[in-house]
Amino acid sequence: MGIALIWSIITILFRWIFSKRRGAISYDSSDQTALYIRMLGDVRVRSQVGFEPERRGSHPYLGVDFRTLHSRAESAGSIPARRIRRLFSFQRHLLSSRLLRGAPHLNPLHILDEDYCGQAKCMLEKVGSWNFDIFLFDRLTNGNSLVFLTFNLLNQYGLIELFQLDMVKLRRFLVLVQEDYHNQNPYHNAVHAADVTQAMHCYLREPKLAQSLTSFDILLGLLAAATHDLDHPGVNQPFLIKTNHYLAALYRNTSVLENHHWRSAVGLLRETELFSNLPAEDSLSIERQLGSLILATDISRQNEYLSRFRTHLDENDLCLGNASHRHFVLQMALKCADICNPCRPWELSKQWSEKVTEEFFHQGDIEKKHKLEISPLCDSEANTIASVQIGFMTYVVEPLFAEWARFSDTRLSQTMLGHLGLNKASWSAMEPEASGSSEEGESEPGRATEEPSSRVLSQGSQES
């Protein structure tokens, strides 16, 4: 009972400290010198009115407060909904903290809280299922899906004990990671990070990887998945570049967001001293390899990684006993996990499609408002959710997952390709052109539902 009380007090103190926290550090790649400090809520970075035209010569449009970019207006004097949710379910949060440690339920609280924790525990027992509903899990954990899921996986793989991770430092790190995602973003938020982490877990359990990956590889894979979009602003790289944002200047217009996600993750690792018990060279190795994994998620380098993956598969020369080859496979696994939404069951895939398109269209609305060139896929008048998804599936998702299926020809791979084909057919049926052409012959709808799966495989041999 004393341990539970101490843990509860620590949790309360953490939340108070995090509410006062102001940021993390981004490091230069050459000498690890702190180039800038990201001060969350600090007026030097964001003004209350949303603009800061004088800052570092940046374009005035990019003084936009990314933390409120996708938020909806609230009535004056109202308490933020997120804070209400946390206060309302604080008992559930404490119970869930005990759940993670496997502590028995002494002095049960309200039956509703017990029910939520019981359901969350049941879901964690099936965390390796491809049908895992991350949206439901996020609700059951009171918006803490990333913390709970990542902690559970690290514990499940025995990494906490193996690397002798301090429980207090680990919890602080995971909560800071979750807090540094912009949950006002419709898509690039902590739930997406939790979803990618769960998908990464599914791939790590695939026979080829499970038999070859070291504990160090697994630790890197899970940490990279959890932090791969850390502090994502809800707009894309071209938007940052054309508005002369300081991040674009800092990273010389190259993998701007991915570099920022990596540096933000490094900042949190150093701030929490999570690996302070490891030799300095091991800690630096984790930071470097974490960066290599996160940088691989840059969609602008998709063809580069895909071509290299194809070459390895064509020549059948991937040797997972080789550390560099294992790392490359981890990169490909993270790339798959990052864009696996079209390969999920329709009920989940559709929700993600709607969220990412909402984020795209919101960026387009900002570009229209300030008379900027509208980014591809961001014009709500020229695109639909269906058209955006069909193009994304055809030119990005299908080629990648077809090659992944060549590498790991398992039931999971075939399941993903099957969902991908069905989901693409569903979106195609929603397109106006599809409904118009179906009037010309009865055979059209049938072909729309039968062809996608075969097109997935054929597309894999072509350049995306």
Image (spheres, grey):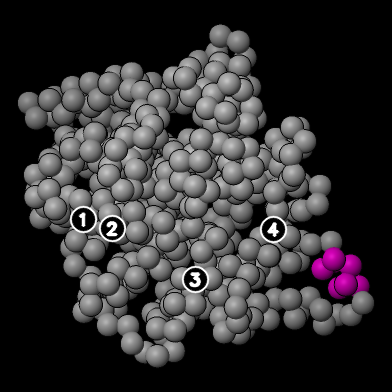
Q: Which residues are magenta?
A: 433-439
> Is 53 placed above or below 24 here?
above
Secondary element under disc 4, as helix, strand or loop, is: helix
First of labels 4, 1 by sequence position: 1
Q: Residue at x 12, y 42 (%)?
A: 276
First of labels 3, 4 by sequence position: 3
Q: Is residue 362 visible?
A: yes
Question: Disc 2 and disc 3: Cα gap in Å?
Answer: 19 Å
Residue picked out by circle 2: 289
Q: Find out whether residue 435 is within the magenta segment.
A: yes
Residue picked out by circle 3: 304
Residue picked out by circle 1: 285
For disc 3, the neighbor class at 10 Å (few under 14, some 14 to 19, many from 20) is: few
User: Looking at the picture, which amino acid does disc 3 mark?
Assistant: Glu
Mark sitting on residue 166:
none
The residue positioned farthest toward the bottom in the image shown: 315
User: Looking at the picture, which amino acid does disc 1 mark?
Assistant: Ser
Pair 4/1: label in front: 1
For the stretch drawn in magenta, the main secondary structure is: helix
* Apparent side of residue 450 relative to residue 406 in the rendered image (left or right): right
